[in-house]
Image (cartoon, helix red, strand yellow):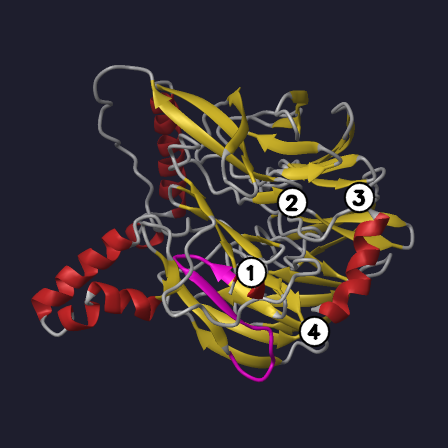
Amino acid sequence: MRHQRTALLCLFIFTATYVQAGEWNQWLGPNRNGIAIDSPALIESLPERGIKPNWIANENTIPGISSSGWASPIVTEDYVLLFTHKKTKTIDGKLPPVKFPYLPPEKRTGMTDEEYKQYEVNRRDEQQRRAKSYRYDEFLYCLHRKSGKLVWSNEHSSVYTRFAQSASPTVNNGRVFLQSAGRLARCVDLNTGKEIWSTQIPGEFRDEYLQSSFLVVRNIAITLSRGLIAFDADNGDILWQIENEDGKVSHCSPAIWDSPDGPVVICNIGGGDTKAVLASTGENVWELNVGANHSSPLVFEDKLILYSSSRKNGLLCFELNNQAPKQLWQYRGVADSGSTPVISNGLVFAQGERRLACVDLSDGREQWMTMLDMNRPRYSSLISADNQVFYGFDGVLAFKASKKEFTPTMRAKIDRDGLLADEEVFREKLGINKLERTAEGQIEAEKLWNRQFSNGPLVCTTPAIADGVLFIRLKHGIACYDLSSRSQ
């Protein structure tokens, strides 16, 4: 990783935002590429009995974090930030049974496209009627980085969306930028939690949920809300807006490229379309359609990585320029609905469909492929520090950023007490191997295993890593673990 520092430094200097080492101040870290800056040396295997957390902030510290969206933790200065939502029932008694539940693809058999379309209309209408029986609020929590104690919380009245708003906060120049439900952009003071401004984004709103995290460049705050929109970071005035007239929606977060003509914002805006515009004016630079959607674009020097939800398009690499980007290669070995890859040591690492692939950045050739022993891993993104890559889903997987072979350094779980340890440690501790010798024991072993890890990593979120410390959102809180060699 250390040979990448010059390029990384150039990237965050041009944005007029000084980012210190040990920060993870926005989605996918200081430079929005999943790479920790100047990481200390990390351990390459867990201690025999695992690692206890430096702290855990559970629902005693930050109430209402369960079932409250999938925003990832942000680490900046002395603080850890988390954005969550909460719904509270406001009527007595039970609601009537749901007539139109969500239908997974396998349960839509026999329905025509028109029948399913009407079913979805009925389902959304029913959910909106039921939503009137609840109150919706959102919370921004600020915890002390060293202790996990609550410093302040910002509570704001919210509205119903089909899923809780899950944008991660972005910190810039002592301000926290958020995209709230109901097409509302907000900015609060980092040190006090007091609101600086809020701006209603023009356009109709029904029950859409959007998860785009703000990008701030040269005092312009940019997000995706059914189209790209830019605000004056000081006062929330709208500077420019690009609406998607055809209603295309994406949960992608924008990336930034330092073009010869100034900073260019690159974002998957929905329907497989990727758009590049000048950050200063919103003027169109180029557009293309390669099927990328919810996965965020990944910019590294003059290269752009786009990742599709279909292996028909897969993983694509482009050379950036002021005209249409030139496609360099395409790799169809993986695909995912929303996970963003990471680049480390000249290699691209991507997960999708229970596969984990390592691809050479220069030519797109597969270096290795392995299967993940996880239940439907998706959405969560990869991050990198000190030549290791980390993936947090139902546990924590770490491996060396090497082209030779897949070399895990950690295959860990987090138990209900917060202990981070290799799976074999827990199997021995719980007597799983002995129980699994009989059919009855296998059933008991599964129950025991599920109870033990009832507070593991929250799926669909992405960990943060800063100064060698891993911050990971759990089902019922946040935990942090010192993975640096200094901890041993």
- Residue 365 against residue 174 in the figure, above or below: below
Mark 3 residue type:
Thr
The kind of secondary structure element at disc 2 is loop
Density class for disc 4 (Cα within 10 Å; few <14, some 14-19, many ≥20) is some
Q: Which residues are magenta?
A: 391-406
- Residue 6: x and y, percent? 82, 64
Residue picked out by circle 4: 346
* Towards the viewer: 38 or 255: 38
Between the C-alphas of marks 3 and 2, the distance is: 12 Å
Density class for disc 1 (Cα within 10 Å; few <14, some 14-19, many ≥20) is many
Between the C-alphas of marks 4 and 2, the distance is: 23 Å
* Towards the viewer: 152 or 289: 152
Residue picked out by circle 3: 17
Quadrant of image for the N terminus: bottom right
Between the C-alphas of marks 1 and 2, the distance is: 15 Å
Residue picked out by circle 2: 26
Say whether residue 249 is left or right of residue 201.
Answer: left
